[in-house]
Image (tube, rainbow, N blue to C red):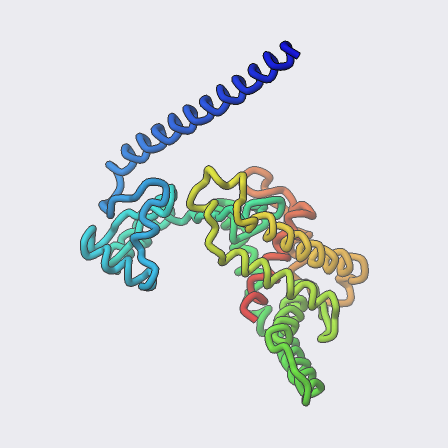
Amino acid sequence: MFSRVIKKEKQQEMEYLKLVGFVLLSSLAWLGWGYLQRRRVDKLPPGPTPWPVVGNIFQLGFVKVPHKSFAELALVHGPNVMTLWLGSMCTVVISSSEAAREMFKNHDVVLAGRKVYECMKGDFGDELGSMITAQYGAKWRLLRRLSTTEFFLNSRLDATSSIRTRCIDQLVQSIEEASGTSIDVGRTFFLMAFNLIGNLMFSKDLLDPNSKIGAEFFYHAGKVMEYAGKPNVSDFMPLLKWLDPQGIRKNMQNHIRQAFHIAGGFIKERMETSSLHTRTKDYLDVLLEYRGDGVHEPSVFSSTTINIIVFVSILKPTSFA
């Protein structure tokens, strides 16, 4: 009995020491972070003094829209450039056309990077396959070049004018057939845009108006856009990103996975059933036939990368439907 009491006291003592150690480490980390931030502030443009933890988030105001708060803060802290802290995320605000011209004309390469939000980081955030998450560089320029010279080429778009006409005719017909009943306008236009992109990429219609797969893809694509637009506390406080307190990253990656699976099915079906001898060359052929130098560019595109390129290419235009 006595040994059990001693053992229990030792366990309580160990738990207490762990708690004290955690508090001390957290305090040291906070002090170290604050010291680094103070050093960084000396090299940054002027701005309002940030509050602990939350930075300047609450100084943007709840009643006024953000751009009005930015304008009022700029009158006090700098008419051209100022610094705001959104949590621990440093944000430089450009408040004049002159400063914007100077930065994006003379320093465009340095400032061409982008912030990749936590919800977009995951198994399907391959920076080689996505123009959304890829940082500016050789890989991003490769994707842009392929898009402008093969996908959005004027001659290709002109050659597919009949396809666009047919897709619009199908849209009108489906609306006429649904006359007298309720119609989901967003889904109807989504299917039209989806088939239009599908013809440019796969030389075929992908979905019919009553398609179950179309409704499923529409649902997951909508959820991806919804979660991408939600404010995520993990973006402002990186220490919490492993916790994902709002579940945004987990939910978004789940919807991306489902939509990615559907898009991959279209690629597999097209590769198994279509022959280049019976149709014109499309965007998927370009991706499959691509050969790079293997140094700054990949020697070939992997199946995963092709899936991501196709998924992003489909998602971006159809997300506005």
In which quadrant of the rendered view does residue 183 lie? bottom right
Residue 115 vs residue 54, the one in the foreground: 54
Q: Can the viewer see residue 136 in this picture?
A: no
Q: Can the viewer see residue 276 in this picture?
A: yes
Residue at the image position 48 percent from the left and 40 percent from the top: 240
Residue 149's x, y, as percent?
A: 55, 60
**155 left or right of 114?**
right
Residue 262's x, y, as percent?
A: 71, 58
Residue that protrudes farthest toward the right in the picture: 273
**204 left or right of 238?**
right
Q: Where is 270 relative to 291, above or below?
A: below
Residue that protrudes farthest toward the bottom in the picture: 180
Q: Where is 178 relative to 120, above or below?
A: below
Residue 145's x, y, as percent?
A: 52, 55
Where does the C terminus fall, quadrant-wise? bottom right
Residue 115 vs residue 112, the one in the foreground: 115
Residue at the image position 68 percent from the left and 55 percent from the top: 258
Residue that protrudes farthest toward the top in the picture: 3
Q: Where is 8 relative to 219, above or below?
A: above
Residue 249's x, y, as percent?
A: 56, 48
Q: Where is 318 relative to 98, above or below?
A: below
